[in-house]
């Protein structure tokens, strides 16, 4: 039996290579043994144990991408869409789709060479780029026009725009600019059958009545492969300054309440745990980090008002301006992201905003190993990160605490063994049947990232 399987497997791999080489050329197709080590690590972290990926393709154009997906669809090969692969380790483990007599072969497809700037309408504050453009490169291009994209994703130098949309990945900018889908004006993508489609932008209607931009944002590549996006951009602020208040938890909770009820307009406002504060050299008390970005007089006035609030509550105030301000938020983001190849556990959490401080207190009482948390004050969304030796029961206990306060806990990154022991998304809402129906309509053969998303979608 094993001999027959090996022969069949070799035949399939050769068939994949022959088919894709005709589309991309041999230079842009790598069989597993020839894939460079960083990509092998990223893919290995994304798939279930005892699974394998047969090859990695790098299409150069959207047409080549569509041809590859058409070929895979016709042959019923599983597909793992990716940009640079920086977040392939997020979410559920990708499972080979069972078929008789053997599971479907799986191919990985990277869009990182679809990386062109299509249009920058500076006067309209919009930009259109291919999905494989890296976030850092786009920000540099926009800065030349004194503009920026109000998103702060993980791994900003490696993350691609398509990957950011697919994972809905933004951080503290949520306070002022909301989420990724609020930046998205148009999208082009390739369906699971290889057909090309688009929505938003100059298109008046979405296909089949769906708001495709919202559906694709955060769908983790399970509905289609993004090829191009149009995004809203903003003028670069004249000044950027931050104040961090720290001290008694009840006082921090009151300062947060006063801030959110005031006329102040921060771009960032995060409650951060004592371990994060310690890495910033600010002691071990709970902190409230608030960033103001606008014209200089406005920033100075708002900083002064928040400092007055802090002093009235006997809180310690630390201020950061100019380069110190930029460095602070870069350090905070790095601290709360987690290295891709590490054994750290990184979770996205949600909580009722008014319960954020209470959650930090409860986490402290659990005596967890080396943990940190950051929660956005207005949305209640945030990150929880800890050492990889946290037990499944501890993690489920934290999830119960979040759910009891109207929230959730989803595991983005963890050792593979832990992901095999728990349901990583922890979704308990009533929309799962709807999501499965949408998955069936967009990808009826379950070829795109099978098993990665909520409910094994």
Image (cartoon, rainbow, N blue to C red):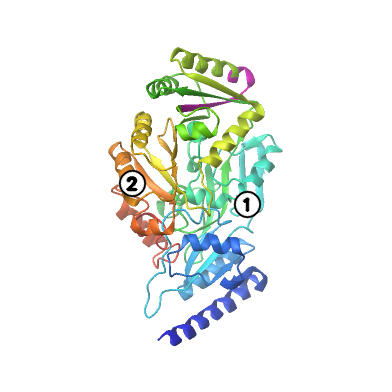
Residue 95: give x, y in percent of width and height: 41, 65
Q: Is residue 190 left or right of residue 351?
A: right
Q: Of label 2 and label 1, which has the lower sequence position? A: 1
Q: Is residue 57 visible?
A: yes
Structural crowding at the residue carrying mark 1, measured as other residues with C-alpha within 10 Å and reported as few (<14), some (14–19) or many (≥20):
many
* Left or right of 188, for residue 375: left
Q: Position of residue 381 (x, y in %)?
A: 42, 38
Residue under label 2, please give it: 394
User: Residue at position x 33%, y 44% from top?
Assistant: 399
Q: CA distance from mark 2 to mark 1?
A: 39 Å
Graded by Cα atoms within 10 Å as few (under 14), some (14 to 19) or many (20 or more), the crowding at tag 2 reads few
| Mark 2, secondary structure of its residue | helix
**359 left or right of 34?**
left
Q: In the rendered picture of this protein, how many numbered marks are placed on residues?
A: 2
Q: Quadrant of the N terminus?
A: bottom left
Residue 235 visible in the current orientation: no
> Which stretch is magenta?
287-299
Residue 379: in magenta span: no
**Helix, strand or loop at disc 1?**
loop
| The disc label shown at residue 133, or none | 1
Q: Position of residue 115 (x, y in %)?
A: 64, 54
Q: Is residue 296 one of those drawn in magenta?
A: yes
For image coordinates 42% across by 19% down, the residue present is: 258
């Amino acid at each position: 039996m094993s001999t027959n399987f090996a022969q069949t497997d070799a035949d399939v791999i050769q068939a994949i290579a022959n088919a894709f080489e005709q589309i991309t050329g041999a230079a842009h197709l790598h069989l597993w043994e020839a894939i460079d080590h960083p990509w092998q690590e990223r893919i290995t972290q994304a798939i279930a144990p005892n699974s394998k990926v047969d090859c990695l393709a790098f299409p150069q154009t959207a047409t080549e991408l569509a041809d590859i997906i058409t070929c895979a669809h016709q042959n019923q090969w599983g597909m793992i869409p990716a940009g640079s692969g920086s977040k392939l380790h997020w979410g559920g483990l990708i499972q080979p789709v069972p078929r008789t007599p053997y599971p479907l072969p799986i191919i990985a497809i990277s869009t990182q060479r679809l990386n062109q700037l299509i249009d920058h309408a500076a006067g309209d504050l919009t930009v259109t780029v291919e999905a494989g453009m890296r976030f850092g490169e786009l920000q540099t291009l926009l800065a030349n026009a004194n503009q920026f994209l109000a998103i702060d994703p993980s791994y900003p130098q490696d993350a691609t725009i398509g990957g950011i949309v697919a994972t809905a990945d933004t951080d503290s900018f949520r306070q002022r600019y909301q989420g990724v889908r609020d930046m998205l004006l148009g999208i082009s993508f390739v369906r699971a059958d290889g057909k090309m489609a688009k929505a938003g932008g100059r298109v008046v209607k979405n296909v089949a009545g769906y708001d495709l931009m919202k559906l694709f944002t955060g769908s983790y590549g399970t509905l289609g492969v993004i090829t191009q996006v149009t995004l809203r951009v903003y003028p670069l602020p004249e000044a950027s300054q931050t104040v961090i208040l720290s001290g008694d938890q009840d006082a921090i909770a009151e300062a947060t309440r006063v801030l959110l009820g005031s006329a102040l307009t921060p771009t960032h406002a995060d409650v951060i745990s004592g371990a994060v504060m310690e890495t910033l050299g600010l002691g071990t008390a709970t902190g409230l980090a608030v960033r103001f970005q606008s014209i200089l007089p406005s920033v100075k006035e708002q900083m002064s008002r928040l400092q007055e609030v802090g002093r009235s509550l006997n809180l310690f105030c630390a201020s950061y301006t100019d380069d110190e301000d930029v460095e602070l938020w870069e350090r905070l983001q790095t601290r709360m992201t987690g290295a891709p190849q590490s054994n750290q556990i990184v979770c996205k959490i949600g909580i009722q905003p008014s319960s954020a401080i209470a959650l930090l207190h409860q986490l402290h009482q659990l005596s967890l190993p080396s943990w940190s948390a950051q929660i956005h004050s207005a949305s209640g969304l945030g990150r929880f990160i800890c050492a990889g030796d946290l037990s499944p029961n501890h993690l489920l206990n934290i999830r119960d605490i979040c759910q009891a306060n109207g929230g959730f806990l989803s595991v983005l990154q963890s050792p593979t063994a832990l992901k095999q022991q728990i349901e990583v998304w922890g979704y308990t809402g009533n929309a799962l049947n709807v999501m499965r129906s949408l998955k069936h309509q967009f990808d009826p053969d379950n070829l795109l990232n099978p098993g990665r998303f909520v409910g094994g979608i």
